[in-house]
Every structure is written in C-alpha cells, then in structure tokens.
Amino acid sequence: MKCKVLTIAGFDGSGGAGIQADLKTFSALGCYGMSVLTALPVQNTQGVRSCYQIEVNAIVEQLECIFDDITPNAIKLGMLFNSEIIDEVSSFLKKNAVGIPIIVDPVMVAKSGDRLLLKEAVEALKEKIIPIATLITPNLPEAEDLTLKKIITHDDMKEVAKMIIDMGAEAVMLKGGHLDMNTSDDLFMDCDGLSEFFTAKRIETKNDHGTGCTLSAAITSFIAHGYTTSEACKMGKVYLFHALNAAKDSSVGKGHGPVNHFVNIWPHLDLSIYK
C-alpha cells in the first residue's frame, strides 16, 4: 500500500468524529490508516457525556510501536486534551517524524460545548505543536482562542491567519464556516505569502458531526498522495462538501449526524461479488 497515514487523536464510539472519522476518510481516499489513541471521550451525536484521559506512557508506547514497524507518509494530530500529552507527543515527533508532514486539527471544544483541550493546555499547543505543523486547520472559535482576536470579516481572517503563521506553522487553513454568510469560505495562507480563499455553497443540514476531523483527515490523505499543501486543502474541501451533501437528509442518531465518508464508494458497492 503506497500511502500510510497516522492519526493521533481521540475516540468517538458513535463513529462520526475522532479516530473513527479519520480512519474512514483515509480509507475512502486510498490510504492505509493507523491510529494512536490520546483520550476517550464518551460521546454520541448528541454530545459528550464524559472524557477519560489515556495514560501518557500508553500514548508514547503506542507511538513507539507504530514507528518501530511502519513509517507514516503523513501524520494528523487531533485531540490532545492536556499539556502533558502535548509535551510527550511533540517531543516524540520532533525526534522521530523529521521530514514527515504533520497536519494539526486543534480540537478544543465539542459542539456540545464540552472542552476537548483543557484551557491550561492552550499555551502548550501554541508553543509545542504549532511550530512543528506543516498545516494547522482551526475553525474560527479555535483561531480566536489561539490569538485572542475576534473574527467577523474576511480581513479579520487574514489577520488571524498571519498571527498563526507567526507562531511557527508552515501554513494555515482557517475554516470560515462560523461566519454568517451564504457561502462557506476557508482561507489558506502559508509562510511564503500565498493567500487564497476557497469558497463553497453552504449546505443546510444538522448532520455536521466530525466535519473538522474529516476535513483535516482528507487533507492529510491528499498530502500523503503527494499533492502540495494548498492543493490538498482545496481537494479536502471538495471532498467534505460532497460528504456533507450526501448526508444532509440522513438520520444517523438523534443529534448532529455524521457526514457520508464513503460518498464516492457506496453508490458503486456490489455485495454480490462475495457470493
């Protein structure tokens, strides 16, 4: 298998977000997915009920076990939960993942309002994770949390993206879905000065559970396939649009349902070949 991709992230037993969404996305986009579990949120489409920390030693051992055997072509970081986990994961990657693209989805707060990154860990994320990021993909509330700058306009997005670049990231994909607009406008900016908005029609649906995880996993997949960071961001947004659109009227769960990660595969599924 050509592309081997690792997600270092939290759990979602309902299957729509976290490592479950990542592995589905990797598979849908032709990558072999691996995972390191960092935290155990107990959640479904209606929200997070509780969250259990994974022992830091167990996280490091998972990382060591993967890297002793398989070298990823790209790595996605999702939920890291606290500063101790951030310290160990960043230290390990600095030593063992040199030259491997690292895509950071700074998971901070669930749709239910539950914190998935403790407040005490925000500074650690800024100091230890952002400087090793090939790309970071915050939504607007996450970007505001990182920069303490309110985002209302496209110009605000450009200013905040530049602030995140100045923290050490090679590039940022600032997701503009929280703006009150008819379109969903995401801003790509890199440290070389490239700046471009990617625009898509806004899809009216409650089934948006795990969209951030899915987008960053898609971008990671495309980067593993050899596309540039900007190309991967544009292609990831297109993939997410179709995954959202295919699930807009579905009814998985009683709350915010998941997207259809296999939108391009399931319509062509023929189970009769296994008879």
Image: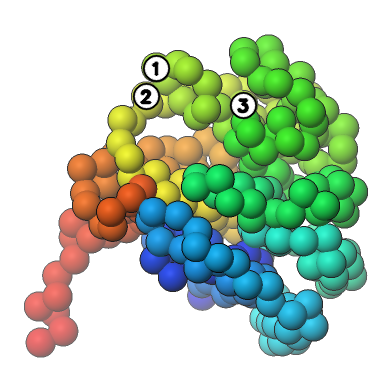
Distance Cα–Cα, label 3 vs label 1: 16 Å
Q: Residue 35 placed where, x, y %?
A: 59, 73
Q: Residue 48 placed where, x, y %?
A: 50, 59
**Type of amino acid under label 3:** Leu
Going 36% across and 48% down the picture, which residue do you hit? 256
Q: Quadrant of residue 59?
A: bottom right
Name the outermost residue toward the front.
49
> Who comes first in sequence, dot 2 or dot 3?
3
Q: Secondary structure at mark 1?
A: loop
**Type of amino acid under label 1:** Asn
Q: Secondary structure at mark 2?
A: strand
Q: Nearer the viewer, mark 3 or mark 1?
A: 1
Q: Check if mark 2's residue and mark 1's residue have beta carbons within 8 Å.
A: yes
Q: Which quadrant is home to the C terminus?
A: bottom left
- Give the number of the disc on residue 201: 2
Which residue lies under the disc numbered 3?
187
Q: Quadrant of residue 162?
A: top right
Which residue lies under the disc numbered 1?
182
Q: Check if mark 3's residue and mark 1's residue have beta carbons within 8 Å.
A: no
How crowded pointer 2 is (Cα within 10 Å; few <14, some 14-19, many 20+) is rated as few
Q: Residue 55 placed where, x, y %?
A: 74, 80
Residue 182 visible in the picture: yes
Q: Secondary structure at mark 3?
A: strand
Residue 112 or residue 139, whichever sits in front? 112
Q: Is residue 232 shown above or below 48? A: above
**Type of amino acid under label 2:** Lys
How crowded pointer 3 is (Cα within 10 Å; few <14, some 14-19, many 20+) is rated as many
How crowded pointer 1 is (Cα within 10 Å; few <14, some 14-19, many 20+) is rated as few
Going 80% across and 31% down the picture, which residue do you hit? 147
Q: Is residue 153 left or right of residue 96?
A: left
Residue 23 visible in the picture: no
Distance Cα–Cα, label 2 vs label 3: 15 Å
